[in-house]
Image (spheres, rainbow, N blue to C red):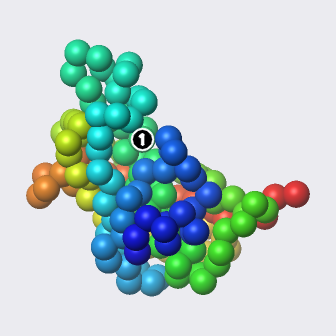
Amino acid sequence: MDIHEILKRLPHRYPILLVDRVVELDKGKRIRALKNVSINEPHFLGHFPHRPVMPGVLILEAMAQAATLLCVASEDVVLDEKSVVYFAGIDGARFKRPVEPGDQLILEVTLDRAKAGIYKFTGKAYVGEELAAEAQLMSTMRRIA
């Protein structure tokens, strides 16, 4: 899935769109996506000017966006202006190494459970073969007024 397909499936836009490409998608099971980390991203101006590091919360958000892509592809849903996917929980988040400009973040997310509109995922983010972050994520898809 290239950036054009991602833009059709996610409501996020710059500067919060954090998935550049989907390289593997097994509907209902798992997704593998990429985020190219660039020094031009606005959060690096202040986090940290002397040693730029991608904020952990944005790594979690990147995993959540990959999880959303897995969810909408698995359910054959097209998000529109009345659809929102919300975080419902984040558990066991751990950060193992800094993510810096020039890194390519590899996002691996598996769908563990889907029941009553709640989706539970295991997310891992790698730089090369090194685990950068991991977490259990929960989300829900809702229609808004």
Q: In the orientation shown, which residue stands out farthest toward the left? A: 129
| 126 versus 69 height, above or below | above
Q: In which quadrant is the N terminus drawn?
A: bottom left
Identify residue for label 1: 58
Circle 1 crowding by C-alpha within 10 Å: few under 14, some 14–19, many from 20 = some
**Count of numbered circles in the view:** 1
Quadrant hosting residue 80 = bottom right
Q: In the orientation shown, which residue stands out farthest toward the top? A: 50
| 47 versus 76 height, above or below | above
Between 61 and 44, the one lying in front of the other is 44
Side (left or right) of 91 relative to 74: left
Q: In which quadrant is the C terminus drawn?
A: bottom right
Between 34 and 31, the one lying in front of the other is 34
Residue at 29% x, 34% y: name it. 39
| 88 versus 22 height, above or below | above
Residue 72 locus on image (x, y percent) = 57, 74
| 18 versus 27 height, above or below | above
Instruction: Residue 144: tell me if it is visible.
Output: yes
Residue 79 locus on image (x, y percent) = 67, 68
Side (left or right) of 127 relative to 83: left
Residue 24 locus on image (x, y percent) = 32, 77
Residue at 48% x, 58% y: name it. 65
Residue at 31% x, 73% y: name it. 23
Check disc 1 and give the amino acid type: Leu
Q: Secondary structure at mark 1?
A: helix
Instruction: Residue 30: tell me if it is visible.
Output: no
